[in-house]
């Protein structure tokens, strides 16, 4: 779906000197996991999964629009729309994905990656906590690969990063299961600034 082409602001953090080594990469990825994904994306994904399971089309479209509205820069917005499009196309080309769900995916004017991804997880009856952990792991793995290329770091450093981040995932998923709507927050101004700065970064290898 093209996730490897995005760094979500990490490349600018390296350019600015905020991330210069393995420890800095762990801090960046760990903080985003705890304060951004863990407090907003994770519980939102759980709500999407529940809405797909319940067949609540209105709630799904509302959540899809809400998620897109929280993509604070042009690059982040383009990222989720491009990956949503690519995953929808993949599901269609598999040939055995339920046609009614493919029709539902076509209703969204986006759709975002979160919308399509949770549709697939619900269709394949993946338990919510397992599905959420898989989403968080795929994000962490992509961020680690971005750090390996941008900092740069060695393969052993990458494995250490994934080991440590992997240890944190169950707690993040558990917390997301208990968060109420009033506690959702993706307030991470330094992250938003990094993503904005990346849009005008002179030399770069990633699309965000």
Image (cartoon, helix red, strand yellow):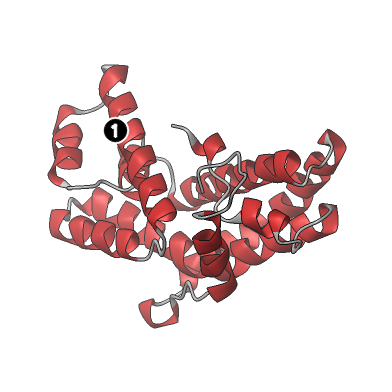
Residue 180 drawn at (x, y percent): 40, 77
Query: Relative to 9, is 17 on the left or the right?
Result: right
The image shows residue 53 at horizontal and vertical percentages of: 26, 49
Residue corresponding to mark 1: 88
Work out whether residue 114 can be spotted. yes
Residue at figure coordinates x 47%, y 60% from the top left: 42
Crowd class of label 1 (few under 14; some 14 to 19; many from 20; radius 10 Å): many
Instruction: Name the residue rendered at 66%, 66% in the picture.
Output: 31
Q: Name the secondary structure under disc 1.
A: helix
Residue 175 seen in render? no
Looking at the image, residue 6 lies above or below residue 174: above
Residue at 39% over, 56% down: 45
Which image quadrant is residue 121 in? top left
Closer to us: 186 or 53 = 186
Residue 85 placement (x, y as % from top left)? 30, 36
Q: Quadrant of residue 124?
A: top left
Residue at coordinates 33% horizontally, 52% vertically from top-left?
Answer: 49
**In the rendered image, which quarter contains the N terminus?**
top left
Q: Is residue 39 left or right of residue 154?
A: left
Q: Nearer the viewer, residue 110 or 50?
A: 110
């Amino acid at each position: 779906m093209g996730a490897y082409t995005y760094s979500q602001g990490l490349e600018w953090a390296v350019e600015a000197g905020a991330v210069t080594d393995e420890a800095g990469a762990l801090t960046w990825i760990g903080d985003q996991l705890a304060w951004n994904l863990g407090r907003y994306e994770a519980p939102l994904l759980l709500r999407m999964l529940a809405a797909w399971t319940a067949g609540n089309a209105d709630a799904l479209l509302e959540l899809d629009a809400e998620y897109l509205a929280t993509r604070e820069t042009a690059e982040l917005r383009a990222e989720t729309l491009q990956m949503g499009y690519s995953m929808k196309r993949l599901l269609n080309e598999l040939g055995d994905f339920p046609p009614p769900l493919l029709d539902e995916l076509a209703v969204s004017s986006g759709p975002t990656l979160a919308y399509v991804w949770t549709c697939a997880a619900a269709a394949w009856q993946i338990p919510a906590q397992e599905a959420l952990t898989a989403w968080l792991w795929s994000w962490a793995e992509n961020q680690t690969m971005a750090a390996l290329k941008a900092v740069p770091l060695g393969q052993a450093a990458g494995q250490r990063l994934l080991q440590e981040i992997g240890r944190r995932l169950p707690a993040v998923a558990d917390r997301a299961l208990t968060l109420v709507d009033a506690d959702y927050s993706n307030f991470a101004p330094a992250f938003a600034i990094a993503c904005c700065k990346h849009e005008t970064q002179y030399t770069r290898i990633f699309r965000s």
